[in-house]
Image: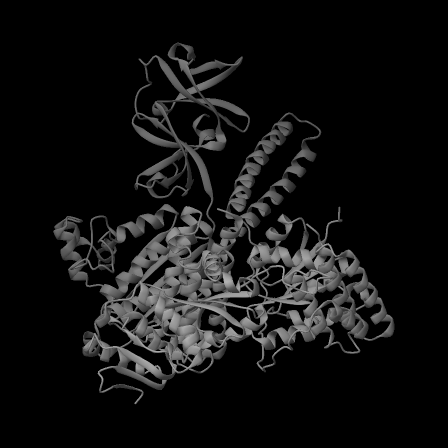
Amino acid sequence: MTIKVSPAGNIELIGICSSDEGEVLLQHLLATPHMMVDWRACEAAHTAVIQVLMATRPGLLGPPAALLLEKWVQPVLAATMDK
Amino acid sequence: MDPQKTILVVDDASLVRLYYRTTLEGAGFHVEEAMNGLEALEKLLTFPVHLMIVDINMPQMDGLTFLQAVRRKDRALASIPALVTSTESAAADFEAARVAGANYYLVKPIDQPRLREFADLLCGVRR
Amino acid sequence: MNEFLTQFVIESRELVEQATEGLLVLEHSPHDAERLDSVFRAFHTLKGGAGIVEFAAMERAVHAAEEILSGARAGKRTLTTALVGDCLACLDQVIQWLDAVEQTGELPSSAANTKADDTWLADMLERNPEVRAQVATALQFIPDPDCFYQGEDPLARITALPELLALDVQPMAAWPALNSFDPYKCNLVLTALTAASMGEVTAHMHGHSGTCEIQTISDVRTTPPASALPAQARNILTEQRAMLSHATAANLAGFVASAGLAAGNALRSCALAETAAIIAQATESSLSANSPEPLRHAISQLLSPTPAAVTETTKVSSKPEATAQTLRIDARRVDALVRLTGELTVAKNAAGHVAKLAQQEGNAIAGLLKDRQVVLERLIAELQESVLGMRVLPLRSVLQRFPRVVREMSLNLGKPLTLEIEGDDTEADKAIVEMLFEPLLHIVRNAIDHGIESLGERAARGKPPTARIRIRAARQADQVIIEISDDGGGIDVDRVREIARTRGVATEEELRLMPEMDIIDLVFAAGFSTAAKVTELSGRGVGLDAVRTAVERIGGRVSLESRAGDGATVRFSLPFSVMMTQVMTVEASGQMFGVPLDAIVETVSVPRTAIVGIGAAHAIVLRNRTVPVVDLAAILGLREAMSGETDATIVITSVAGHFGGLHVDRIGQRLEVILKPLDGLLTGMPGITGTTLLGDGRVLLVLDIGELLQ
């Protein structure tokens, strides 16, 4: 289970999120649109998952655990948020 | 003024040969064409060539086989620089071309500015 | 249209035909490896051509199909009917594009690059000034929408690029509404800048699913100040050094000499003549020492160390293809040749006339002249045959469109069908081949739509569920015969009779007396159509009469034979070689006639009074020459000699050296027609050389001027 809802009410991305999680994440966000996404424990995320984040633009709680994600993907998501 | 350089274009697709011809003639080169390795060998024996542009994937005699044969001939032919082209972009393809005696390798399609640039460099033309 | 586009259109059309043929076969035998390979290559070459003319949309579309076939080739998927359909749909789109290109002379503007302009590169470099100096390569990667299903993770791939300096990710199209958003459809454009070389980036991106554009940033880099080496020159030098390490005893001289030349040239091209001289010297040293080392060392001196190349093992295989033994010739050149041959014939005839005159006058040379004339006749006849033979094409180009047609109709109507084609290598004149498709299409559609029964009916009649259509072509003497047979229900003679009666195509009395064969032939009559409902497939009820008119225009015949309950056969009988004649139309007494153009010298308009009577005949004086004039309408028995008009229009003709004038009401236009020799009622009618059918169905009588003016 790499996507779950924390007691605090955030959607958490934990560990390695594969492509399948994309659909799961989308469903969560559709059901509860104002939830923040907490990816501080995220080690890796498939493009499908990142794509969902780009399209839905939820609030993000970071930085993500993986350096690659922090260095390259976070700025992309930040830019998306600005629009 | 440099004397005019001759480039031999070896590719089985006539559209490609036309494209190279137009681009290179426009840059002041003399262009000869061959549809396959066999024809290319004949042309090499007929006129002085300053650069060969060879496509790998051709029927009858593919580009690399042709190149290997050329590199074994006497100096006049064997020393002609060869620019090898292909649609493949794997490192192994670069390597295979090198082993066959290519002096450079470009992945198709090659745009006109790049084609002219390499033609100039490999023929020693100053602009 | 520029040269590239013309060539591109011609070649692409051929490739589409090749691919279509292959796909239809593959549908029935999806494991035919050779066929799969050839279809894949067709798509691959199509894509390459689109790349050269920078037709980005076509490149992308064809790429999608190429991916399907590539997957099938690799055994990753089987080619289902649906997938074949997708590939065929792609080809349909390509044909549409090609037609548009041919019409407008340029690429369709809507199909031009969408995001693939080079502005992406400039933008990206501008937005990342802090790394600008280190950038060696830039790329833009647009993954296929369904790449996730193929295990591709675009972001992972790009973030793993060696020496990545900057990354930008944008949506390709605006994000759809969230409840219709498919997270598994990739909608991203990834743009990256890296310090890695083009070769490294290309190798890293190998096997990607999508379109990827990689650009080298040519710039002066910070190198040892002694020699400012431009990036590409540096790349070339590096490459020579790598290549030298592969030299063997057998090709050492070749490797060393060409590497030295390549390196030296690159330096010379950058105005580094002295450095080039050093390389040249090193080359000679290597050659005399029979070792690559001196040259390698010299090159290394000029460069800073570079990383070694990566090695993988994949194999590049190529399959030999047959080379064609044909020449491409513009059809207009062949037409010009045909016209020339026609003129030669006229000239030959004129010479023959002189020879005859000479004989009549007892001239001594007459005999010699006659002999030469015979030789000329033979040569010209051969030439004409040869030239007409150049315009001959195999029927294949027309017939090969039918498998597709039949397949579609079969799917649309739910009637399983097989199509057999025999004799598609039968040849016929270009004019015939060009007009055949429409009539044949009409016949085939009719057969499938009306002739072939539904599955249920066929079962009830004990017929095999898959109906059979057969197209058979063959040459018979000077005719080309094409038969389209089906194993449907044949023609319902009673229905034909009834419809003919209802539509007034024949009277009750006529119908009673008509033999069955003639009743069946009524389907070709004007105003007839047996469609109970005019389906979209069989056309707008234009009818088989249009087919018959089209066929008769080129001098052919079409007939229908029916076997009640068993099927029907439509038979086309067409002339093998077709001679086009140029005529000028003229009007006399309200009727139109054709005058062969090669008999016309000029047309003049003279005052009525200029026509003088000489006995029973008339004449005018034209440039000091007396030219006999006849009134066309009068001579054809259409009316009395004309009078009353102030000016007379006269067509001056010359046949076998004799001048004459045809007095007509009006001059029409020039036409190129196919002459049908006289038959039936018109046989033996003097002054007529043949007839032709005009576009509107009217018959034009073409005059024999020689006979007319005698």
Q: Which residue is drawn at the image coordinates 46% and 78% (left, top)?
A: C73
Question: Along the line of sight, which residue is nearer the eye, C510 or B29?
Answer: B29
In this picture, residue B86 sits left or right of residue C102: right
Q: Position of residue B13 (x, y in %)?
A: 57, 61
Q: Residue at the far top: name it.
A: C609
Asked if one can make out residue C371 in the rendered structure from this viewpoint, the answer is: yes
Choose top left, top right, bottom left or bottom right for residue C80.
bottom left
Choose top left, top right, bottom left or bottom right for residue A10.
bottom left
In this picture, residue C570 sits left or right of residue C122: left
In this picture, residue C529 sits left or right of residue C123: left
Q: Position of residue C610 (x, y in %)?
A: 42, 11
Question: Along the line of sight, which residue is nearer the eye, C234 or C510?
Answer: C234
In this picture, residue C178 sits left or right of residue C662: left
Q: Residue at the far right: name it.
A: C288
Q: Is residue A18 above or below residue C556?
A: below
Question: Along the line of sight, which residue is nearer the eye, C613 or B88?
Answer: B88
Asked if one can make out residue C424 in the rendered structure from this viewpoint, the answer is: no
Q: Which residue is drawn at the image coordinates 54% and 73% (left, top)?
A: C163
Q: Is residue B47 above or below residue A11?
A: above
Question: Along the line of sight, which residue is nearer the eye, C219 or C107?
Answer: C219
Q: Position of residue C598 (x, y in %)?
A: 50, 32
Tell how many labels.
0
Q: Position of residue C474 (x, y in %)?
A: 44, 62
